[in-house]
Every structure is written in structure tokens, then in C-alpha cells.
Image (spheres, helix red, strand yellow):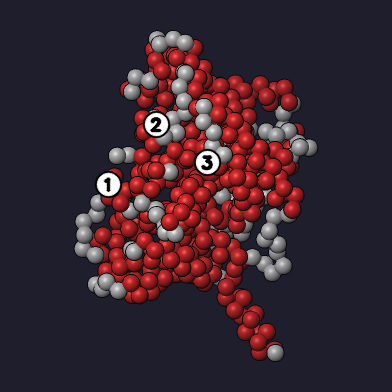
Amino acid sequence: MTSDATTHTRTASLLRHPAIAGAVAGVAGGLVFGAAMAALGTLATVASIVRTGSTVVGFVLHLAIAAALGAGFGLLVAQQRARAGDAVFWGLIYGGFWWFLGPLTVLPLLIGQPVAWDLPGAQALLPSLVGHLFYGAATALVFVGLRRDAGTTTAPPFPAAVRGLVAGVAVASVLYLGLDVMTGTTAGWIIGVGALAGLGYPLLLGVHREGAGPALVRGTAYGFLCWIVAGLTLPPLLRDGRLDWSREAALAAADRLPPYLLLGAGVAVVFGGLGGLGRWLFVDDVRMLRVESPGSRGLRATGYGALAGLAGGLLFTLVMALVDALPTVAGIVGMASPTVGLIVHLVIAQLIGVTYAVLFRRRSFDLASGIGWGVSYGFAWWVLGALTLLPVLTGGTPLWSAAGMAASFPSLVGHLAYGAALGVVYYRLEDRTNPWWFTRNQIESERVAVQRETTLGSAPALWGFIVLVALIIPLVISG
């Protein structure tokens, strides 16, 4: 008995080592990815590395590679906070990175083929990209499970599940009614999906006490995951009993991507709001309210947000002028003049800048975090603004089809550039007023603690994943 207990203790101790735990988790993720590869018939490609076409050899080699990559993942995130909600985004961005480095770059070289860094080559490898995302998520979840202390609960509390369900149904209902009003069509599927997405949000990502801005970004990324699972993976499995991650299947499901992104963002924000009824919804940390009086704090944030939004809007104007989009923006006020369009565009840019200031105050601690939050927010506004509100306000319907998203691709570039400029300028303005590194009192020390919390959490991975989603969209919609 003592020997068995000692062996168990040693095994548990070994699994606490990040590289070993990562290797085991990598095998688990490899099994998930390998099963998909077997269903898609791509294991022979892996086997060709050792000059054979055997699927068995391909599967064994695939698991060996998965274990090695898992060990690297464990070492990479060893110092990060051991929560599934944070680790899953690190796993996703890690899987996406290895798709770029592996199938798109190294694998062709190993099997004697030229590297094809072009759009058709990437589109042909879209099933592998989806598989790598599943691998990264599964590896991250198993890694957290292996490293979690004994006795630590993994399931969210019951109230959180109820909150998620209410948030999912509420947001899905708004989208359901909005579709009916904007397009004259209804999508009953979204209510059921909304309920499942709401329940899954705290289950997969945990319960975070965070501001509405970070929650919106986290929810947008979650919405993309919901699209991958419920929009791309499950329909062919339930309908035909087969897996289909091809570019053609993704193109057919593209019209559901924007509503899934909006659903995820809405679920996250409403979920956080329901959990903070005793606090103001858009206050990031009540400890920081003592820094300035409410009046000066709100006025200064509004001014900084408007100025940062103007800077981003001017950069965005370059893109809009190149594609002659200003007359379309002028249609919001019933006109077609490019000058009027420019004025309306800059006013909107400042208003969005003000909302950024409200949602992301004191969230940027350096240029990287300013760019990260800004680009993520710009992407969210491409979905909400360019694809949804702008066409509706100008008398049309949401551009949620693949063709509509393709036509709006220049706007995506502009929104990302706008977000980057917005985040950088707002960080510099806020930094001059309340530099976070001055730890002369308890309040400033708490701000440094918030910075550490952000760094050790999933924020950097979230920024990277939003950029990855922006890169995936052209793979799906481009002809």
C-alpha cells in the first residue's frame, strides 16, 4: 500500500512538471486532432515525412510530434495563471502558430515540395488549421487539468451557469428580433444556440471579474469558437455523419460567422453585467475609483477617447478614400457627398473612441497592450459597424454573406488600423496623467497588480487570436 501511494505521489509530482504535463496534454490533443485527420484522410501526408504512405505510421508520427509540441506549450505557459479560461486561448494561438510553421512551411520542405505561401495554398490547408485549433484547445485544457491542485473545483458554480443561460437567451433573442427587423427573415436556430453558448461560456472560460471591454474581446473570440464547433463542425456530422472542414464547407457557413461573433460578444458582456449588479457595469476595478473625482475622471476619459478616436479616424480615412467609401458613409444622413461622409466618419470615430475610453480605461500598460486592446476593439466594430449597422442605416441589409464580407474586406483593414492608432494614442494620453509604474501609494501598487493580472491571464493570447481570426476570414471568403 505504501509503495502504491509513493508511486502515485511520484507520478503526480512528475505530471506537475510543465514539460511532462505538456507532453501528456499534447498526446491528448494529438488524439483529438488525429481522429479528425483519420476522418479527413490526411494521415498519409504526415507519414510521407518518413517516406511511407501508411496511415498507422502517420498516426504514430503525428502523436510523437503532438507530444513534442505539447512539451513546448507546457514550458511556454508554465508561468501563466492555471485557469482553463486563460489557457484555452494560449492553446488556440499556439495551435494557429504551429499551423503556419508546420503544414504551411516545414512539412512541404520535409516531403520535397515547394513552400506555397499564397492564398490558394493556405485555403487548401484550412482543414489542417481547424484541426490545429482543436489540438491547441484540447492540449491547453488537459494541461490545466494535470497541473491543477487536488481538490480544486473545475465546474463553475450553479449561479454562474444560470447567468450564462440567461445571457445567452437574452442576446440570442435580440439577434433573432434584429434579423426579423433588418432582413425580414428569422433564424430560430439562434435561440437554441444562444442558450448552449450561454451555458458553455462559464463552463469553458470560467468566471472572470473583468471590465466590459475585455469581456467584449473575450466574447468575440468565444463567438468564433462557437462558429467553429456549432457552425462548421457539427452540421455535417449530424447531417451526413462525416467531418468537413474544407474551404467550401466554411464558405457555406460564412453567413453565420458574424452573428456568432455578435452572440459571443453579447453573452460575455451581459454575463459580466449580471454578475456585477452591485457595481457599475463599465467600471473595471472599484479600487481605482479613488484616484480622481468622478467628474474629472469621466471628463478626462471622454476627452482622451475623442482625441484618440479622431487620430484613428484620420488613419482610417486613407483606406476609405482609396476604396471611395465616404459617399456610402454619407448615406447615413441621407446624402452622398464625400465631404459629408468624411465629417460623419470622423464624428463616428470620435464616438467609438469615447466608448473605448469607457470600456478600456487603465487596461493598457505599454504600447503592446494598447495596440492589442485597440486592434481587438477595431475588429469588433468591423463586425458590428461595417457588416451590420452601416448597411442597415443606409437602407440595406447586414453584409453577413461571404460576398458581403469580401466586399467589406478593405473596411476590415481600416478598422484594424483605426483600432491600433486608437489604442496607442489613448495609452499615451492616459499614461501622461496616471503613469502605472509610480508605486508611491497603495492605489498605484494595486494598479501594478492589475497589470500583473493582465499579463498572467489570457489578454496577450486574446489579442493574438483576434488577429488570427482576422487572417482566417480571407481564407474563407476569398475566391
Q: Which residue is mark 3?
A: 260
Q: Which residue is mark 2?
A: 404
Identify whether 214 is placed above or below 58: above
Mark 1, other Cα within 10 Å: few <14 / some 14–19 / many ≥20: few
| Front: mark 3 or 1 | 3
Quadrant occupied by the C terminus:
top left
Q: Seen in the image, is 205 located left or right of residue 183?
A: right
Q: Position of residue 289 (x, y in %)?
A: 73, 33
Q: CA distance from mark 1 to mark 2?
A: 20 Å
Residue lying at the far front in this picture: please name it.
Answer: 239
Q: Which residue is mark 1?
A: 120
Callout 3, which amino acid? Tyr
Identify whether 455 is placed above or below 325: below
SS under mark 2: helix
Callout 1, which amino acid? Pro
> Quick one: label 2 or label 3, which is nearer the N terminus?
3
For the point 52% across and 41% down, the residue is: 260
Q: Seen in the image, is 389 located left or right of residue 296?
A: left
| Front: mark 1 or 2 | 2
Q: CA distance from mark 3 to mark 1?
A: 26 Å
- Asked where in the image residue 151 lies, by quadrant, the reply is bottom right
Q: Seen in the image, is 49 located left or right of residue 208?
A: left
Q: Position of residue 159 (x, y in %)?
A: 75, 49
Task: In this rendered view, identify the residue nearer to me: 1 or 54.
Answer: 54
Identify whether 337 is placed above or below 33: above
Q: Mark 3–mark 1 contact, CB under 8 Å?
A: no
SS under mark 3: helix
Callout 2, which amino acid? Gly
For the point 53% across and 48% down, the residue is: 226
